[in-house]
Amino acid sequence: MNFNATIIGQAISFILFVLFCMKYVWPPIMIVIEKRQQEISNSLILVEHAKKDLNLAKIKADNYLKTAKKEAKTIIEKANKYQDETIHTVKIIAEKERKKILEQAKFEISHEYQIAYENLRKQVSFLVITCTEKIIEQSINKNNNNIIVNKIIDKL
């Protein structure tokens, strides 16, 4: 094996090139690579945090939705209860009003009945008096007839 000057020259220049690269090229490349690795690591950590936050947000949203549904159900139940109470109250008021109107109608009917009865009584009395006057005109004893007519009027 013969070592000649070109091989030794090439070996020396390769060693100088490697030393130059290790001294001046390699450190900036390593700094950039480490920086990039740190950024990627931070991004992955942020992604994990974002996933956790997303899961928490989903859980909170589900809980909020469940709470809102329960509240809506409660509000609907209260509204239905209020509606039932209102309907019941209105029915009671309507029933009282119906009874009041019915009593008033009965009173008016009774009053009209009394008026009609009095009018009829007056008409019958008038007819009786008219008949009695005709009987008295034909009769000789007017005093006896007056007593009889008064008795009839009193009975009516």
Image (tube, rainbow, N blue to C red):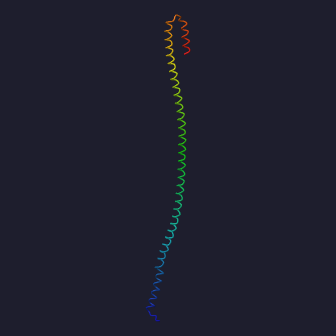
Question: Which part of the image, by quadrant, shows the C terminus?
Answer: top right
Q: Nearer the viewer, residue 46 or 139?
A: 139
From the top left corner, tell me how far across and down residue 22 is, in percent: 48, 81
Residue closest to the far bottom: 1
In the depicted structure, whether residue 7 falls above or below residue 25: below
From the top left corner, tell me how far across and down residue 85 is, in percent: 55, 41
In the depicted structure, whether residue 140 falls above or below residue 112: above
Q: Nearer the viewer, residue 6 or 76?
A: 76
Residue closest to the far top: 140
Q: How many marks?
A: 0
Q: Nearer the viewer, residue 6 or 89?
A: 89
From the top left corner, tell me how far across and down residue 51 is, in percent: 51, 64
In the depicted structure, whether residue 129 falls above or below residue 72: above
Residue closest to the far left: 6
Q: Nearer the viewer, residue 76 or 59?
A: 76
Q: Quadrant for residue 149, please give it.
A: top right
From the top left corner, tell me how far across and down residue 93 is, in percent: 54, 35
